[in-house]
Amino acid sequence: MKKLVCFFGLVAAALLVFAIVSNQAEANKAIFVTGGDDEIEKAKAISLEILRNRAALRSIGNPDEYSIKRVEIDELKMAHTHVQQSIGGVPVWEGEAIVHLRPDGQLSDITDSLKEAVTIETKPTFTGGEQALAIARGIGHGRILRKLTDPPTIDLWIYRGDDRDHLAYRVIMPRIDGTAQTSVPVVFVDAHTGEKIFEYEKLQTGTGCDDQHEFVWQHVLYGRPDRPPTRNFQYEQHRQHLDRNRRNAITIYRHGRCVERDE
């Protein structure tokens, strides 16, 4: 009788161990395999839940207001969810996070620059952006008016300054005319007080080349980039070609001719 009891005890213990091992194997099963739409949605849901838990410990706003910029599933079957922080429906400048998930959906790490304790009235004093554009372009008080060659882009952001948070209009003003004054300044204008709070230049330069020719070119990093042409283009011709095809990026070729390489 004792032998029979011991036998059944060993069987029960073996079944228990098998169940534990099976549960662990199921828990470690990869849920990110193909990178399909269903897996993308899983990654979004898991990432937002993780951020909700973080929001209970940090004053980073409501993650349900965040916008998901993209989800990437890499060759290691890890998912990386990129999110944009928003407060009251307004995006926070440089307030971003990337939630890194293991193949089984468990949290690996979070990379974030989320702004804590944002305190701001998200309703602007002046609306429509026209006043912000006027301030950014330098209209009035004897200031020089910035020349624009393309329509400006004006949108609303929360900008964290050195001393306080601002509700600000971001004004992007492209001047793409091939002259020495070519630039794409970006100016942040306080949507409550009208003061300029930050400005930077979005135009970057570099040297581009292809398999046969070498170019010296200047590239506007807003919209989709374009590669250098493979034959001699005048700036005006290339600009018209881009505009006619509704391309967002403008590439300026300071030297309009191709330079053959010495083989």
Image: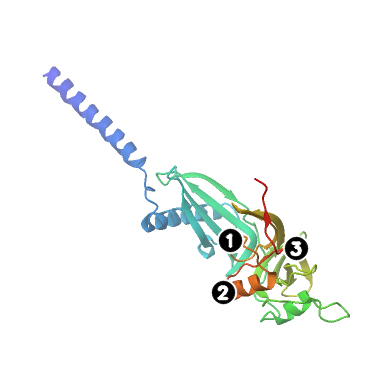
Residue 131 visible here = yes
| Residue, disc 3 | 200
In the structure shown, which secondary structural element does the residue marked by tag 3 occupy?
A: strand
Q: Earlier in the sequence, mark 1 or mark 2?
A: 1
Give the mark nearest the N terminus, 3 or 1.
Answer: 1
Return the residue nearer the eye: 87 or 4. 87
Query: Residue at left 32%, top 41%?
Result: 26
* Residue 119 higher or lower than 139, as above or below: above
- Which of the marked residues, 3 or 2, is nearer the chain's N terminus? 3
Q: Nearer the viewer, residue 17 or 214?
A: 214
Tell me: 3 left or right of 57. left
Q: CA distance from mark 3 to mark 2?
A: 26 Å
Q: Which one is in front, 11 or 155? A: 155
How far is mark 3 from mark 1, CA to CA?
22 Å
Residue type highlighted by circle 2: Arg
Between the C-alphas of marks 1 and 2, the distance is 30 Å
Query: Eyeballing the image, is 164 above or below 97?
Result: below
Label 2: state its secondary structure: loop
SS at mark 1 in the image: strand
Viewport quadrant of the N terminus: top left
Disc 2: which residue: 246
Task: Report which residue position mark 1 lands on.
Answer: 85
Q: Quadrant of the C terminus?
A: top right
Q: Badge 3: how crowded within 10 Å, few (<14), some, or many (20+)?
A: few
Tag 1: residue type?
Answer: Gln
Q: Can you give x and y, in whole percent of width and height, for residue 255 in the image?
A: 73, 62
Residue shown at 71%/59% (left/top)?
Answer: 204
